[in-house]
Amino acid sequence: MTVLIVGASVAGVRTAQALRMKGFSGLITLVGEEPHLPYDKPPLSKEMILPEGDPAPVPLVEQEQLAALSLDLRLGVRVVELDVSERSVRTDQGELLGFEHLVIATGATPRRLPGVGVLEGVHTLRTLEDAQALRDGMTSARNVVVIGAGFIGAEFAAAAAKHGTEVTLVEAQEVPLDHLLGREVGSRLAEVHSAAGNELLCGVGVAHIEGNGRVESVVLNDGRRLPADLVVVGIGAAPATEWLESSGLPLADGVECGEDLQVVGTEGIYAAGDVARWPHPLYGQDIRVEHWTNANDHAGIIAASITGASLPKAQVPYVWSDQYGHRIQIVGRPSSGSLTHVSGTLSGGDLVATYAGVEGELVGAVVVDDPRLLMKCRKVITAGSSWESLGLSPASAVERVG
């Protein structure tokens, strides 16, 4: 039996590891578009940007461990097409790679501003090269504009502030993360930017970016012009499914999968991580989660399915973000519930927010710098218990998120 894994980031590497842990002894071919040995992505927008941070990537797996997996490792190779009937993929070098089982783990690609073209100094942040270019650019940048105040934009702004630069964040929503966490919680998270000396402009979009070969300014759609010698675009990501468009696989904001992450209507073809949309057993609806822990969880499910083992229990979604010396942890799906409690601030390191479903069950929580409470919230969500079991006071005003 052979397994071909397309994508050598966390979802792909963890799937290979999980297969070996399940006793799979067949050939595993792991194909990665980047030329580097697999590395961890979260530090790219955090430690690697800091002036005192280590610019070297953090390995996903040590070389000795990687060698022990006995993989056919193909790095610097991009897969461009899938032929389901022939059970093969074609690479950008024209090579055909066959498979019995296929794992699609190509992740997501950053969205770019339309009509910008190629201007030096305008960056997205998804790869090692992106992080290194930004780190180099920060040594001379004086005016930094971050477009998008979500997690990537906020994390970069927090790191950029350490370089002593003028940082302006531009957010199209009236409140950052409003669509995920609601206005009250989004506002409390956003307060930390101004406290750190960064400027946050909300409810305004970008009309265009100006520059002659290199970025010079960002023009907002209300006419304001922001001087900029470095711009980071953090307006979300889209699942990397372009290479699958001719395959006939069901694509709808990701690859549509069943509960075992097998692609709907196929046999032996799976999707994992950011690219996979699947019916999460805890929620009864299809979801797609872009985060490290989700990719880890998917690896175990796919390995069990391929080897015929019992599927592991689905885990509650979990996301974290490090900003301004604080760790924001989000468990569950706050956008599926109503705000029932909120207290504290991000800068104070004591922010707590909880969200409940229609019957009062806890469905999501935001916790800053309190791992013990976070674990308690996770257990309550998993059990389907009431948010009141946490012993927190009700919010003064209840709002619906999303």
Image: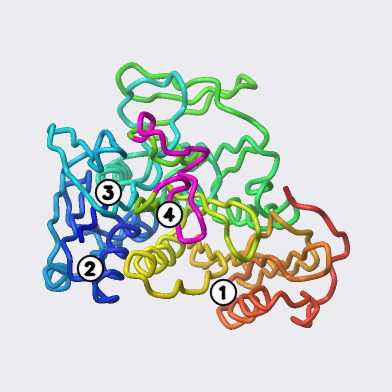
Per the image, is 281 magenta? no
Residue 299 in which image quadrant: bottom left
Q: Looking at the picture, which amino acid does disc 4 mark?
A: Gln
Residue 303 in which image quadrant: bottom left
Distance from disc 3 to disc 1, alpha carbons, whole Å, reads 36 Å
Left or right, 128 with reference to 279: left
Q: Which residue is disc 2 drawn over?
A: 61
Query: How many C-alpha atoms fall within 10 Å of the one at disc 2: few (<14), some, or many (≥20)?
Result: some
Between 267 and 131, which is closer to the camera in this rendering? 267
Distance from disc 3 to disc 2, alpha carbons, whole Å, reads 17 Å
Q: Secondary structure at mark 4?
A: loop
Q: Which residue is disc 3 drawn over?
A: 6
Q: Which residue is disc 4 drawn over?
A: 262
Q: Secondary structure at mark 1?
A: loop
In the rendered image, the quadrant that contains the N terminus is bottom left
Left or right, 279 with reference to 265: right
Marks 4 and 2: which is nearer the front? Answer: 4
